[in-house]
Image (spheres, rainbow, N blue to C red):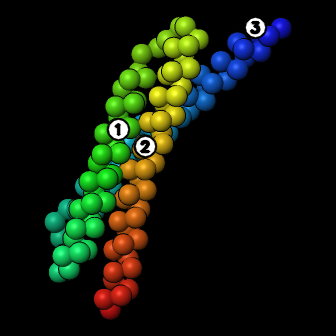
Amino acid sequence: MLKNHLRRDLRWLRRQARGDRRITVLVLTLVPAAWTRQLAPGDAMPEPELLFLLSAGLLAVSGAAWFTSAYFLARSARARREPVEVLRRVTRVSRAKEWAFIAAGAYVAWHVLQFVTVLVMT
């Protein structure tokens, strides 16, 4: 009976990892597209040096988090058969998802920074 419970739990973890993997791939696809769209040359207002440094820092954090997430996702790409390897894969996918959302969070923080700056400057 214990073996059946373990098997069922492992199956549930695999299913959860598949869903998390899809979400992570989607976020990893959208974050660079969003940054590219926002940083495209256009009508740029002159910004103070501090704002520029904060923006560059948020972009660097987002990029580092994106690469970390992509690394964990790449490490989890191979299908595993052993239960311990499956658990490692699940944790890697989970960590990749966390880092992908950190990258997206840095993008959102950049947007909030820009919004607050516009409110204060006008």
Total numbered badges shown on the rendered structure: 3
Q: Amino acid at mark 2?
A: Trp
Q: State the residue position of label 2.
A: 99
In the rendered structure, find residue 68 and report the number of the disc placed on it. 1
Q: Secondary structure at mark 2?
A: helix
Q: Residue at x 28, y 67 (%)?
A: 54
Quarter of the image that includes the N terminus: top right
Give x and y (percent) for residue 34: 33, 55
Is disc 1 in contact with disc 2, using a CB cutoff of under 8 Å? yes
Secondary structure of residue under mark 1 = helix
Which numbered disc flags the more N-terminal residue, 2 or 3?
A: 3
Q: Residue drawn 17% across and 81% down?
A: 46
Q: How far separated are the C-alphas under marks 3 and 1? A: 35 Å
Circles 3, 1 touching at the beta carbon (< 8 Å): no
- Left or right: residue 32 versus residue 15 is left
Q: Quadrant of residue 110?
A: bottom left
Picture coordinates of residue 122, whole percent (x, y): 32, 92
> What number is the disc on residue 3?
3
Q: Residue at x 43, y 23 (%)?
A: 76
Q: Quick check: can you spot residue 22?
A: no
Q: Is residue 98 above or below residue 14?
A: below
Query: Looking at the picture, which amino acid does disc 1 mark?
Result: Thr
In the image, residue 24 sits, relative to residue 8, either above or below, namely below
Q: Residues within 10 Å of mark 3 (few under 14, many from 20)?
A: few
Q: Residue furthest bottom?
A: 122
